[in-house]
Image (tube, rainbow, N blue to C red):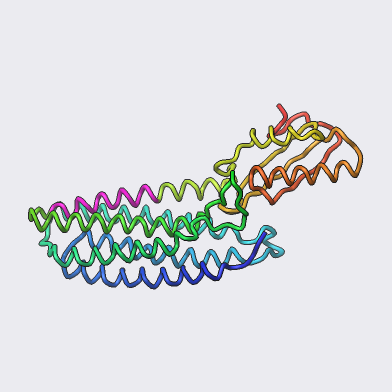
Amino acid sequence: MHFQVDQTLQKRYLLAIFLTSLILIAEVAGGIISGSLALLSDAAHVFMDVFALGLSFFAMRLAARPPDDRHSYGWHRAEVIAALVNGSTLVLMAIGIWVEAYKRFRAPVEIRSTEMLVIAIIGLLINLLVAFILGRDSHHSHAHNDQEHSPRENINLRSAILHVLGDAISSVGVIVAAILIRLTNAIWLDPLISVFIGLIITVSAFRILRTAIHILLEGVPDGLSVKRINESLQSLPTIESIHDLHIWSLSSDSVALSAHITLNTAGLKESENSMTEIKELLDREFNIQHTTIQFERTPCQDGHGGCN
């Protein structure tokens, strides 16, 4: 397992934080000047983008710390916790936007659509640039790639990118609202677009929260199956039975596996060869390198992952 910060990714995070901060300043000023709730809602989303990027950056550095006496697996779960916090803040932000939209429906205010449109276009362009900067490493992983199994996606980085992409979609909504308001003078479109922005944010939050909670509950990583891995291991000629097979994520891009295995051979040399074959199979077919294998003489009577 690696415990080093990717310097290139770190620089991209800092650049993304800087550019997103510029959007925040522009949209807050533009929202106040134009009186647009959609633009201010987008600014609230941008503020959470800055927070999410900063939190993800901090978690990335924390996750690079090596194991110690109190954290034998290291600090990998810091990135998962950061993603969980980011997802939760997205939900809170969506609720706040809906509350403000309800108020605007009841008490509409005048909208200056030209200023609203200009700021939204600038925000969209910068958001797309930030998403591109971070997206180039959206599959950043220490696990190597092969033809069948791509590197696992880092949930911390994905949560940050979803924040930015969600804001880009929000900017598109603001642009559409500004154009329609300018053409029709229907100012109720402003809070309506805000409601849709809130829905988009909620969908993004749900995906992040679902993945983060699944990892924290030590669920089997997406794309892997206990049954399939058991069957693949059983195909090795030296394996008689498998039990207590467990697969879980240390982080979104680091998978661990443990298993008790009974061999049909008792020699030390054969056991060493079997261990090598097992590790090579898990690495080759399932991209799993962090394994704990225990050989036993007596087949199990019960246990998950191989025995019924």
Q: In which quadrant will I find the C terminus?
A: top right
Callout count? 0
Query: Relative to residue 268, is residue 295 drawn left or right?
Result: left
Foreground residue among 258 and 98: 258
Extreme residue toward the right, this view: 267
The residue lying at 77 percent from left, 45 percent from top is 293
The residue lying at 39 percent from left, 50 percent from top is 204
Query: Relative to residue 216, is residue 54 drawn left or right?
Result: left
**Most common SS among magenta residues:** helix
Question: Which residue range is magenta in the image?
Answer: 188-204
Foreground residue among 228 and 73: 228
- Residue 194 belongs to magenta span: yes
| The image quarter in which residue 168 lies | bottom left
> Residue 71 appears at what percent x and percent y?
67, 61
- Residue 151 belongs to magenta span: no
Extreme residue toward the left, this view: 184
Extreme residue toward the front, this view: 147
Foreground residue among 117 and 148: 148
| The image quarter in which residue 110 lies | bottom left
> Residue 37 appears at what percent x and percent y?
20, 60
> Residue 13 appears at what percent x and percent y?
46, 68
> Residue 56 appears at what percent x and percent y?
48, 63
Q: In which quadrant will I find the N terminus?
A: bottom right
Vertical side of 228 occupied by 96: above or below:
below
| The image quarter in which residue 247 lies | top right
The residue lying at 29 percent from left, 51 percent from top is 198
Foreground residue among 182 and 86: 182
